[in-house]
Amino acid sequence: MHHEASLIATVAMGFMLAFAFAFLANRLRLPPLIGYLVAGIAVGPFTPGFVANTALAGQLAEMGVILLMFGVGLHFSAADLFAVRWIAVPGAIIQIVLTTALAGALAVSWGWSAGAALVFGLSLSVASTVVLLRTLDDRNALDSPNGRIAVGWLIVEDLAMVVALVLLPIFAEMLGGRPDPHSPVGGNTAVLITLSITFLKVAAFIALAVVLGPKIVPWLLKQVARTGSRELFTLSVLAVALGIAYGSAELFGVSFALGAFFAGVVLSESDFSHRAAADSLPMQDAFAILFFVSVGMLLDLSIIVREPVAILAVLLMILLGKSLIAFSIVLLLGYTVMTALTVSASLAQIGEFSFILAGLGKMTGLLSNDGLSLIVAGALLSIALNPICFMVVDLIVSRAGIGTRIGGYGEQRLARLQAQLDVLRERGAARETERSLRVQNLVDLFPIFAQLDHQAPEELLLLFRPRTASPGDRIIRKGDRPGAVYFISEGAVQVAIPNHEIRLGPGEFFGEMALLGGERRSADVVAIDFCKFLTLERRDFLSFVNRRPQLRAQFDEMAAQRAAEHPLSGSETSR
Ligand code: CMP
């Protein structure tokens, strides 16, 4: 097969080889990531045999980046970033400046132009959040203070890169590249105008995401969750993630990645963030694999033969240069050696943003083909070597006993951070417990719901509307059209049927007969105490019970029993 492999062939071969190589990698006790990258090289245009469609693979990879950034946003909590701000913000910014300068100097020494050197330097300065999250997750270190610092650091880097992506086309001409096709006139004034417009757009987008997003998105998801359809919920999560990412790119010219990140952040504030995360995870995983495969595809193996020294230099810059810079910054900021080591290992790789930057650099005429290949080779090798970097950290720690040394200024800071993170974690856990308690209460209080699947009480909590009544209030009038069903959580009511004294109390319900039978209300119902009810609207009640035949049968049976007590029903039995 040749260049124009179809989408299905590209995806199928990508997944099959990724699986085969990842399985092999697992056998060899290597991370599966390496398997994905090798699969990419195998289906890439630079190796013989099957060649996947590079353009399609690139787009699939972009989907991966969107979903992954969405996931980062979903797990991102502003409070967490706030807790690590004193190290993550200055650390990441200083590190980007120093690494860009160092790597840029290397490029200039090779005779590259200033523009090319800048793109190259920036590309090497930013590490991959995707790779880091995977590594930390594998090591169970995502929630540790050092893990949080590393993630916070990389998020600041990502945000800085988004700014760089926005600015690069504007300054491309000044740096010796092609002029920005979107700019109407050339020259300095044009740069200023484009710059202001771009910043206004980004500001407008962030304002919208921060102000409108948290109102609209959770509301929408709540409506979807109320339908009880799992499929629809997953779909809504995807639609929100991709919709915001695409919409923001189209409307505001903000990158897909930033849009997706904000979509995740918006969702993370809602009650459904856990479900959204769980539902989008398989998609994230699948597309992340395609992302790594497509990285592998970009690698022109011949560069290893043509430019072995340059590749080695790039690799050393990523593994050692960047790590040493980060290591020193962390120590200078007053943190522990352990923190410095974790951050260094986390930064000793480059990934998605480097490709995006390098791609843009090529498009704007700043970076050459070989420059791009060097960055890709550096990324591939550094990603593959990253687990080893963490192993080295482990080794240093166990040999030098760093982790066991307590005391000192840095340790205190870390302990304080740990305490802060614990508080945040507890708050999250408390919210979860409260939720599960509410579910438990519901099941305990209303025996009719005891047998339901575990998702049902959650759905009920969404559907219920609270109502109250005072003694003497007529809640239901005989002969009215039915509105809602009432579940009594506190108080008592009286059902007015001639010759019968029917009192209903907590745990019981009323108002179901007319709804189930499609009739008018069969009796007056009056509060005889201060009451609290949980009510289900007609449509919600019917859709809920109709999807659960057993429950529907229980309600029908109860309604039939109750109807039998009415004077006109003939077969009267006493309660
Ligand atoms: P509905 O007919 O919708 O409105 C009046 C409600 O009173 C009715 O539903 C039942 O929920 C309740 N009800 C009527 N008859 C009885 C009964 N015999 N025992 C308990 N509740 C009743």
Image (tube, rainbow, N blue to C red):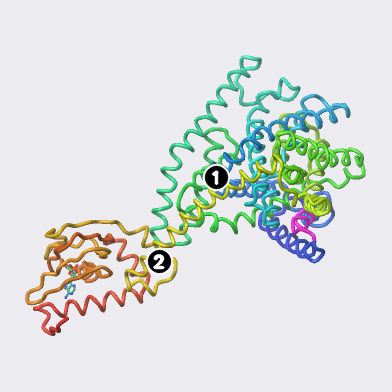
Element under disc 2: helix
Say if 567 sits above or below 265 in the image.
below
Quadrant location of the C terminus in the rendered image: bottom left
Q: Where are the magenta residues, as a range? A: 30-38
Q: How far apart are marks 2 and 1 (CA)?
A: 28 Å
Majority secondary structure in the magenta region: helix
Tell me the mark number nearer the camera, choosing from 2 and 1.
2
x, y percentage for residue 27?
80, 66
Give left or right: position of 435 versus 175: left
Say if 208 sits above or below 406 in the image.
above
x, y percentage for residue 429?
50, 55
The residue singled out by tag 1 in the image is: 77
> What residue do we see at 51% from left, 34% from top?
206
Q: Residue 440 carries which label?
A: 2
Neighbours of disc 1 within 10 Å: few (<14), some (14-19), many (20+): some
Q: Which residue lies furthest to the left in this view?
A: 498
